[in-house]
Image (cartoon, rainbow, N blue to C red):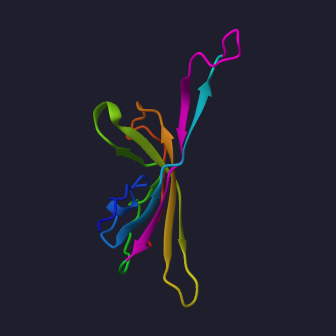
Amino acid sequence: MAFFPKTDFCGLSAVNTNILIRDDAENISQEKYQPTGQKGQFCDLEVYGEDAAPTNSYAIKGDLDIAAGAIKIGKITTIGENAAAKKYALESFEIGTSGGSVPTLSATSQLVESDADASTMPYAAIPAF
């Protein structure tokens, strides 16, 4: 039995080969306009205002040596191609540690406009760790 491939909405698995995608969730929400006819029946459905706040959980399979600026809050990751492409900006990431358990890594991102440009998007570079 095979598992579905996971999508790296936050782009952290590209930073280091010891970061593996464990879980993903796109968390899509949309606004709907559903006007009613004279008898109260729905006569149309228009979807607008799609928004997404994807999350990823990662597994750490070895030592991490992350260079300064390799992780940037605000960095854009593009998922898909051509007209189906969506862009997500990294919002946050968290490394969790506690005695006697494996370190955890998770991240959240936000859907941005399709014309958002990575070269002009503001970002905050994370120092080396």
Q: Residue 100 occupies which quadrant of the picture? A: bottom right
Residue shown at the point (60%, 31%) measured from the top left? 31
Q: Which residue ends up furthest to the front in the rendered image?
A: 39
Residue shown at the point (28%, 33%) measured from the top left? 82
Above-or-below relation of 65 to 74:
below
Q: In the image shown, does 16 or 25 lie closer to the viewer?
A: 25
Q: Is residue 128 visible?
A: no
Q: Is residue 58 magenta?
A: yes
Q: What is the x, y in percent for residue 120?
A: 42, 37
Task: Give left or right: position of 40 versus 109.
Answer: right
Task: Give left or right: position of 48 versus 129.
Answer: right
Q: In the image shown, does 28 or 127 lie closer to the viewer?
A: 28
Above-or-below relation of 82 to 17:
above
Q: Residue 39 occupies which quadrant of the picture? A: top right
Residue shown at the point (34%, 35%) measured from the top left? 84
Q: Which residues are magenta?
A: 36-60
Image quarter where the C terminus lies is: bottom left
Q: What is the x, y in percent for residue 71?
A: 42, 59
Image quarter where the N terminus lies is: bottom left
Q: In the image shown, does 113 or 74 lie closer to the viewer?
A: 113
Q: Is residue 120 magenta?
A: no
Residue shown at the point (49%, 79%) measured from the top left? 103
